[in-house]
Amino acid sequence: MREHRLYQADWLLRFYKFDVADITSASHPDLSIDMDPKSAWALRNPAYFPLDVNKASREELLRVPGFGVTSVDKMIAIRRHARLRVSDLVLLRVAFNRAKHFIITADYKPPVFSEGKLLAQFTPQSAQLSLLL
């Protein structure tokens, strides 16, 4: 799992224009094992969100969890002709369940969550393992 998080962080640095200071900071010097680095950054920067997908720049859209480079480029091309809606994002196969907390579309505005509830949405539920065979 640690290697996977390092791979994700490297990807953010190379293709998403993140800086090392964005991924780690003095208060969060290590990568989270439970959460991908992009989601962790988004949760640490609530003032940055929600973003309107019909107005945000490419660099801003790349910071949204659930949006990839290809889907952002397609969104920018589509919004030249029409306003983006949730159905458009689903057709583009973005991870809407992760993105929905951070975006505004022509037909969707996210509900206001407390920081603790939003963090709970992104952390996996722990499960008690059995020693019985």
Image (cartoon, grey):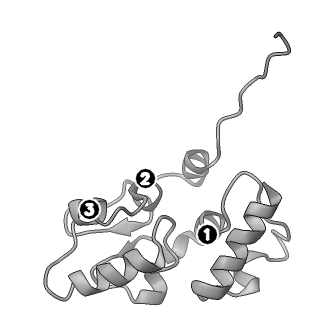
Mark 2 Cα-neighbour bin, 10 Å: few <14, some 14–19, many ≥20: few
Q: Residue at x 58, y 55 (%)?
A: 115
At a point 44% along the width and 65% down the height, the residue shown is: 102
Looking at the rendered image, the quarter that the C terminus falls into is top right
Q: Nearer the viewer, residue 109 or 131?
A: 131
Residue 58, percent from left and from top: 42, 88
- Left or right placement of residue 43 versus residue 21 in this view: left
Give above or below for 116 relative to 53. Answer: above
Q: Residue at x 76, y 84 (%)?
A: 20
Residue 39: x and y in percent read: 60, 64
Dot 3: element: helix
Q: Is residue 65 above or below residue 61?
A: above
Q: Kindly identify the residue that appears in the image at 64 percent across and 70 percent down.
A: 41
Q: Earlier in the sequence, mark 3 or mark 2?
A: 3
Q: Which amino acid type is marked by label 3?
A: Leu
- Badge 1 element: helix
Marks 2/1: CA–CA distance: 14 Å
- Earlier sequence position, callout 2 versus callout 1: 1
Q: CA distance from mark 1 to mark 3?
A: 22 Å
Q: Nearer the viewer, mark 1 or mark 3?
A: 3
Residue at which label 1 appears: 38
Q: Quadrant of the N terminus?
A: bottom right
* Three-letter code, disc 1: Lys
* Label disc, if present, on residue 87 of the rendered structure: none
Q: Which mark is residue 97?
A: 2
Q: Is residue 97 left or right of residue 28?
A: left
* Mark whose residue sits in front, 3 or 2: 3
Q: In the image, is residue 105 above or below residue 129? A: below
Query: What kind of residue is marked 2?
Result: Asn
Q: CA distance from mark 3 to mark 2?
A: 14 Å
Indicate the quadrant where residue 100 lies: bottom left
Residue denoted by label 3: 91
